């Protein structure tokens, strides 16, 4: 359990909750049920949460899979500095956002899911995790001059003499094997017609 | 590069065929259930109350039923290993099909996810409609108990509602932890949450049984009263007449089927009084012939569940109990209930 990065799961949950809020909000406003303005709120809150959670944070260890096109929102989130980096703030924010949606039946599930995501973010914050933006790696152009190094001084390693049996030319042509070297078949390959 | 049809068929053919069969099953189930609730005469009043929400919720429920049953099989690894290694599965084609078990599991999972969304949305709208369209005329059909009952109460204070909410939460946890990104980076989260499937199935069992809370949707009441002498009927003669008139005026004259039996055959055989005319015409001399009665009720309620409520001496109770357990050719079930005050 020690190496689990909770923030990543919280992020998936928050994104899903955002979508659930949007769906619930649409059902509520389209149906024009009483207190449908809670539905409108739910759509707005859902969109906000989805935008906030879309860029995945960088994992502490290993490579992180980026979501398609997330670099644009990453740039926006970076501008807010500690507000978006800190998971305590995110936990509180999500909890507060979820409350108004709880008043309407159509959006109450969105509340539950966002509240759970908030809880997992709290856990992540307690364990010291932070949102780090995934930076694009600078592409290194191979400079032609720098790649030419000293030619090797030793020949490549070769298998011992017994293994270096020269195959006959006919078999070699049939098997398509390059003569000598590590690619030679230790057992000659013949085209046996069974 | 052009596809070799021989290779394509060998590699993809059976898999696509199975997928097509599974897809057809789902579409068929959804369509049939949708039509049943849209047009079935026994659901006419419910349909008036709930509209499209009823059809969508039930149709998606049947698809969910199918997929929840199927989804566990591809994960029975011991069974799959046995099939793969045994002589029972000789062909390479079948073995290759078994390799696709995880993909099938994920397909069923995604389907469950989508149709759960439809099912929940439809039921939320249903809860709202139950509350808004509450009518005194159809008390038995309505899950709400009074007009404008807060639909959130329906959600959290009924067995199907509460288990449904818990299942959505469990499903939410399981699905968010099953994404590719999580599986690749934090496999533990995926593994531990996926074991919640056990909780999900327990809740599912409760969820469907919760619908049986109102086991006898009252369509008709057969009221059979056996007394030894005529005066005994006077205890409730007025009440019975009032009931009879009420349903007669509501154009539901057959809602209560009153049958009075006078077991002692000598003596006065009519309840005195003109206003008891309705009861006198439903008075029979002699003991009831229970077998014939059960047969008639079974014939009029084919395939349904009929509740039998007996209040009386043991001799009648034994007879009714035995008859309730007996087979009949109409597929009707009789559930026996007894109460006595002596």
Image (spheres, rainbow, N blue to C red):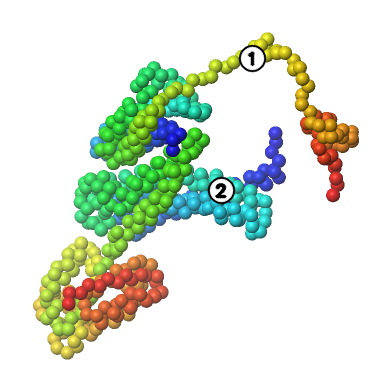
Q: How many marks?
A: 2
Location of residue B231 by image quarter: bottom left
Can residue A108 be seen?
A: yes
Q: Position of residue B68 (x, y in %)?
A: 45, 51
Q: Quick one: which residue is furthest to the bottom in this view?
A: B266
Callout 1: few (<14), some (14-19), or many (20+) C-alpha neighbours within 10 Å? few
Measured along the vertical axis of the image, is residue A145 above or below residue B287?
Answer: above
Residue at (56%, 48%) from the top-left corner?
A: B101
Task: Work out whether residue A73 or residue B323 is closer to the camera in this orientation and state it.
Answer: A73
Q: Image quadrant for the C terminus of chain B?
A: bottom left
Secondary element under disc 1, as helix, strand or loop, is loop
Q: Position of residue B323 (x, y in %)?
A: 33, 77
Q: Quick one: which residue is furthest to the top in this view?
A: A145
Task: Give the distance between the C-alpha atoms of the residues marked 2 and 1, in whole angstroms.
Answer: 45 Å
> Residue under circle 2?
B101
> Residue under circle 1?
A142
Circles 2 and 1 on the same chain: no
Residue at (45%, 22%) from the top-left corner?
A: A133
The circle drawn on residue A17 is none
Q: Position of residue A100 (x, y in %)?
A: 26, 34
User: Is residue B163 found left or right of B230 in the rendered image?
Assistant: right
Can residue A46 be seen?
A: no
């Amino acid at each position: 359990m020690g190496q689990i990065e909770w923030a990543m799961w919280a992020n998936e949950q928050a994104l899903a909750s955002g979508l659930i809020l949007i769906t619930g909000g649409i059902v509520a406003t389209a149906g024009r049920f009483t207190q449908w303005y809670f539905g409108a709120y739910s759509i707005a809150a859902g969109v906000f949460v989805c935008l906030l959670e879309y860029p995945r944070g960088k994992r502490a260890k290993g490579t992180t899979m980026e979501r398609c096109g997330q670099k644009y929102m990453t740039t926006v989130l970076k501008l807010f500095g500690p507000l978006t980096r800190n998971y305590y703030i995110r936990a509180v924010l999500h909890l507060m956002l979820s409350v108004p949606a709880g008043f309407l039946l159509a959006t109450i599930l969105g509340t539950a899911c966002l509240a759970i995501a908030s809880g997992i973010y709290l856990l992540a914050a307690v364990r010291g995790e932070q949102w780090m933006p995934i930076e694009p790696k600078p592409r290194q152009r191979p400079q032609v001059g720098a790649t030419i190094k000293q030619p090797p001084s030793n020949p490549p390693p070769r298998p011992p003499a017994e293994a270096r049996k020269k195959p006959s030319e006919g078999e070699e042509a049939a098997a398509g094997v390059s003569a000598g070297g590590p690619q030679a078949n230790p057992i000659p390959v013949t085209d046996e017609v069974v | 590069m052009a596809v070799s049809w021989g290779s394509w068929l060998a590699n993809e053919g059976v898999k696509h065929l199975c997928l097509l069969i599974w897809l057809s099953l789902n579409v068929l189930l959804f369509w049939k259930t949708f039509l049943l609730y849209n047009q079935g005469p026994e659901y006419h009043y419910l349909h008036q109350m709930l509209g499209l929400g009823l059809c969508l919720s039930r149709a998606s429920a049947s698809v969910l039923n199918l997929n929840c049953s199927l989804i566990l099989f591809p994960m029975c690894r011991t069974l799959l290993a046995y099939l793969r290694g045994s002589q029972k599965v000789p062909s390479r084609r079948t073995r290759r099909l078994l390799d696709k078990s995880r993909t099938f599991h994920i397909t069923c999972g995604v389907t469950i996810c989508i149709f759960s969304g439809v099912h929940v949305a439809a039921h939320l709208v249903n809860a709202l409609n139950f509350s808004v369209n509450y009518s005194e005329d159809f008390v038995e059909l309505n899950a709400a108990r009074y007009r404008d009952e807060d639909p959130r109460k329906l959600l959290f204070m009924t067995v199907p509602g509460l288990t449904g909410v818990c299942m959505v939460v469990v499903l939410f946890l399981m699905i968010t932890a099953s994404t590719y990104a999580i599986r690749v980076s934090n496999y533990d989260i995926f593994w531990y949450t996926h074991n919640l499937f056990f909780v999900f199935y327990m809740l599912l069992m409760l969820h469907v049984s919760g619908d049986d809370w109102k086991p006898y949707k009252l369509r008709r009441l057969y009221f059979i009263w056996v007394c030894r002498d005529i005066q005994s009927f006077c205890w409730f003669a007025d009440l019975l007449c009032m009931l009879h008139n009420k349903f007669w005026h509501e154009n539901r004259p057959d809602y209560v089927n009153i049958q009075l039996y006078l077991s002692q055959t000598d003596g006065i055989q009519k309840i005195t009084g003109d206003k008891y005319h309705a009861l006198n015409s439903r008075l029979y001399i002699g003991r009831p012939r229970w077998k014939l009665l059960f047969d008639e009720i079974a014939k009029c309620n084919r395939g349904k569940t009929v509740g039998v409520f007996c209040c009386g001496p043991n001799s009648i109770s034994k007879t009714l109990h035995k008859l309730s357990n007996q087979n009949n050719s109409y597929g009707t079930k009789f559930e026996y209930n007894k109460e006595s005050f002596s």
